[in-house]
Image (cartoon, helix red, strand yellow):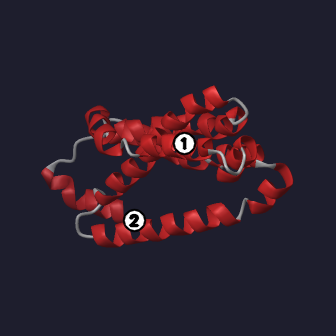
Amino acid sequence: MNTTLRDHFGARSSLTGVMILLYGLGFATSFTIGRWADGLGKERVRTAVLAELVPALAGVPLVTEWTALLVICLVPWGVLHSLAVTLLSTLLSECSERHRGTVLAFYSLATNLAVALGAALPAPLFTSHGFTAVGWARAAITPLAFGPSAWMYVRDKRPRPAVQPSDQEGAAKMLTH
């Protein structure tokens, strides 16, 4: 995005830095918005955020030509990304107290790989078709995260039969097979 902003505003324009700052301000909201997400339910908010990221990822590249609209979009875009990252790390840390360190280490590995590959892999697309094509491509792959997230949210909300104390051993066997 930085290259697109520099192309639009000029290499010496301070507006490029202001635009990146606006996104950063949105991203910095996670410490306050995270509490709000806790109140609404982390799983539900995570699913909604992933659904909202699809049009945001597709739309932000389209508004880079209109400065006022870009200003309006960058803060919410940063907020959505911040919430996605914060909620995912929180939910992963709550998965298993016993394996929390391992889970978070793999999450850190996956995040760093995603940052590196997310910059390198779309480079040919950016070079040949520009920032808008990269936005559309990212919007196209976001449902790969949204789909399983929505499925897990719906699955976890279905009523489950209560397990009687005498059935606990049988239930444990069913879970392992």
The numbered disc on residue 113 is: none
Instruction: Compare marks 1 and 2 and give the one earlier in the sequence.
Output: 1
Left or right, 72 with respect to 64, comes to left
Image quadrant occupied by the C terminus: bottom left
Name the one closer to the observer, 37 or 175.
Answer: 37
Identify which residue is drawn at 20% across, 56% down: 168
Q: Where residue 102 appears, x then y in whole percent?
A: 34, 73
| Crowd around label 2: few <14 · some 14–19 · many ≥20 (10 Å) | few
Tell me where residue 127 sits by quadrant. Answer: bottom right
Identify which residue is drawn at 64% across, 37% down: 60
Can you name the residue that lies furthest to the front here?
Answer: 12
Residues tagged 1 and 2 counted as in contact (Cβ below 8 A): no
Left or right, 28 with respect to 164, comes to right
Left or right, 47 with respect to 125, comes to left
The amino acid marked with disc number 2 is His
Name the one closer to the observer, 26 or 125.
Answer: 26
* Tag 1 residue: 18
Residue 147 shows up from this direction: no
The amino acid marked with disc number 1 is Val
Q: CA distance from mark 1 to mark 2?
A: 55 Å
Identify which residue is drawn at 21% across, 47% down: 163
Q: Where residue 98 appears, x then y in whole percent?
A: 23, 69
Q: Where residue 66 appears, x then y in whole percent?
A: 69, 29
| Crowd around label 1: few <14 · some 14–19 · many ≥20 (10 Å) | few
Can you name the residue that lies furthest to the left here?
Answer: 165
Tell me where residue 71 sits by quadrant. Answer: top right
The kind of secondary structure element at disc 2 is loop
Left or right, 68 with respect to 123, comes to left
Q: Where residue 11 appears, x then y in whole percent?
A: 70, 51
Query: Looking at the picture, does residue 118 appear above or below residue 85?
Result: below
* Tag 2 residue: 177
